[in-house]
Image (tube, grey):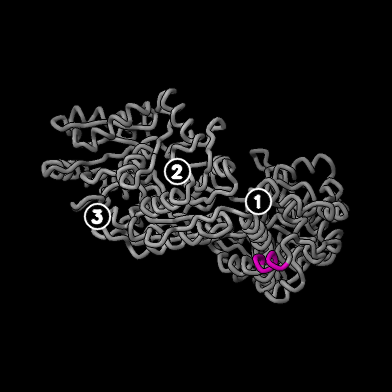
Amino acid sequence: MDSIIRDDIMQEKKNYGDISVRYLKGVGPKRSVIFKKLGIENVQDLFYYLPRRYEDRSFAASIEDLKIGDERAVRGKILKCGVFRARTGTSITCAAVEDATGRLQVVWYNMPFLQKHFAVGKQIFLYGKIEIESRPVMVHPAFDIMDEAHGESLEIGRIVPIYSLTQDLTQRYMRKTIDCAIRDHLGQVRDTLPTYVRARKKLVDFKFAVQNIHFPHSPENLERAYRRLVFEEFFVLQVIMALRRRRHARKGIEHLAKEGLLDEFEKLFNFEFTREQKKCIKEIEKDMASARPMYRLLQGDVGSGKTVVAMYALITAAENGYQSVMMVPTEILARQHYVTISKALMPLGLNIRMLINGLGKKEKDIVGAELAGGEADIVIGTHSVLQEKINYKNLGLIVIDEQHKFGVDQRKTLRQKNAKADTLIMTATPIPRSLALTVYGDMDISFMKDKPHGRKTVSTSWAREEQREEVYNFLREEIRTGRQAFIVCPMVKDKDPSPMASAEGMFKRLKNEAFRDLRLALIHGRMKTEEKDRIMKAFRAGKYDILVATTVVEVGVNIPNATVMLVLHADRYGLTQLHQLRGRIGRGEHASYFILMGDPTTDVSRERIETITKMDDGFLIAERDLDLRGPGEFLGTRQSGLPELRFGNIVRDFKIMEEAREEAFALVTKDPELKDPRHLGIRKSITERFHGKVEL
């Protein structure tokens, strides 16, 4: 894409965006350093520094109508003003203001210099909070002296912007600075959005939007300004997605599925595929047969059968003489996939290998040699599969499982092993459509919600700490019937006043007290791979009754006989993480139980627990989780690839995003190199606002 965005930018260098804030009236070198703390370096940054909220100071109330606690605007005449010093040494500036209905006392502390502004008889506009003593008092209000105001007041008599600031800047100063920038430089702006897009979507121009997002003349104008700026931000981002999509349209590998392959494949399993599994297999089959590389995101709720769908892609590549690699985040999951896939595909005679750090050097070298020589058809492993020394003879398919556990760079490195290879990215963490269009908007997306036939619904309940003994008794009853249980803790070691929070502390306590007659094991992420594998293998074989663990069991663990999971301090987990944990049980023929234990102290943590007890649809849960946590925390900073959006909210403004996406993809279809002069503003915006913030 960098080849698209070049020479035309140079002729814009004298545009408003390149004027440093230091040259604005009242700023200078020292204050420009303070502005930089807010991410404001030039006039463009100032225009895009949106208020965090607004105060409607447009209506002046009568003094007689004021009530305690009100924040109101008042207009009146100054009757008197004076400064006196309290016994504590505090300077108090006190003024009396009246209108036709009554009198108001106004007070400022430690601001004696204000007295010179408040001459008796002058008209003053005030906005502040009312306190009642013997008469109405307004403390530290915003104000404007009417005959001192030049033009419109920025403080009173209007809808007033409130900004996020550092301690070295005031609201009044920020408003004056932005007003100055608007008056002196807004006229030089080149509008990013083409006129035909604005006309079709009934959007105001940039000048109107900036003026009214900072100093709106009415709520209606504020709404129109906001919609215009949000549309622009999403539009530029979706142009990037459309350009990425065209990049994927390069020449790829045509993997043709032989006639009847799906029927042969389904006979390898002793269950019937779900409708959505078949649908996703057909979508992948079509992509792999295409001349362009597949780049598809497969979203499947917990237990929806994504691995089976991925296996079909693996054998399709093998049928066409190409190798496949499946990268997973943990060695436990790599071993589990290796066993599952090897067992299922064994009748086809494929050479399936595993590559993880836990292997010895000799075995790693053998696997590496087989990949380089073409003897290995499929390799399953952790990040070891993308090491520089690992070479593939004819890599045709890349599968990335639990993609949210990998960084953007890791995914990119694996794809660079063969740019023509098809890529299938899988996640059991449902991603809301709004977020998917923002981060994965250049990909085709498949959704799987149906669970395989016979999969049990997991009963979910919330228990308080005082019910601990009752819960323990329930676990004991399940174990007596031959079942097994997980007990999940939020941390490995004790760094918390409560020993119940750590897996190590809980394991010792349970082993010596509540469950001393049962067989317990401990597993967490800090253990050596060999130890974790040994414990999981023994637990799967039924040698332990209870596995005390951290969230290391969140991904991919499959123990059909485990029917109970108790999550301690459940209020410390995100909604999606709780849903993932729940997916580790209910995998066998027996009824299963997911028990959340904790006493949440905040409304958000309480709402998370209540939500997970009422919902089992991972996609609905993800929407709620995104709403509670926001996109950055939902995705995680390591892997998101999410650009920092200045003002668009992908949840609240989803409809605007869909409209912007439609227009952006249509524009790139007509002008894939953005050479049309009408699209110069878009090219400039991509460079200045998103370069380095999204993977171009």
Please tell me which residue lies in front, 594 or 310: 310
Please tell me which residue lies in front, 374 or 162: 374
Q: Are marks 1 and 2 in contact (CB under 8 Å)?
A: no
How many other residues sit within 10 Å of disc 2, few (<14), some (14-19) or many (≥20)? many
Please tell me which residue lies in front, 541 or 139: 541
Residue sitting at x 48%, y 36%: 371
Of helix, strand and loop, which one carries label 1?
Answer: loop
- The magenta stretch spans which residues? 664-670
- Which mark sits nearer the N-terminus, 1 or 2? 1
Q: Which mark is residue 326?
A: 2
Q: Is residue 689 visible?
A: yes
Give the labeled residue for mark 3: 270
How many other residues sit within 10 Å of disc 3, few (<14), some (14-19) or many (≥20)? few
Q: Quadrant for residue 377, please give it.
A: top left
Q: Which mark is residue 164?
A: 1
Residue sitting at x 13%, y 42%: 482
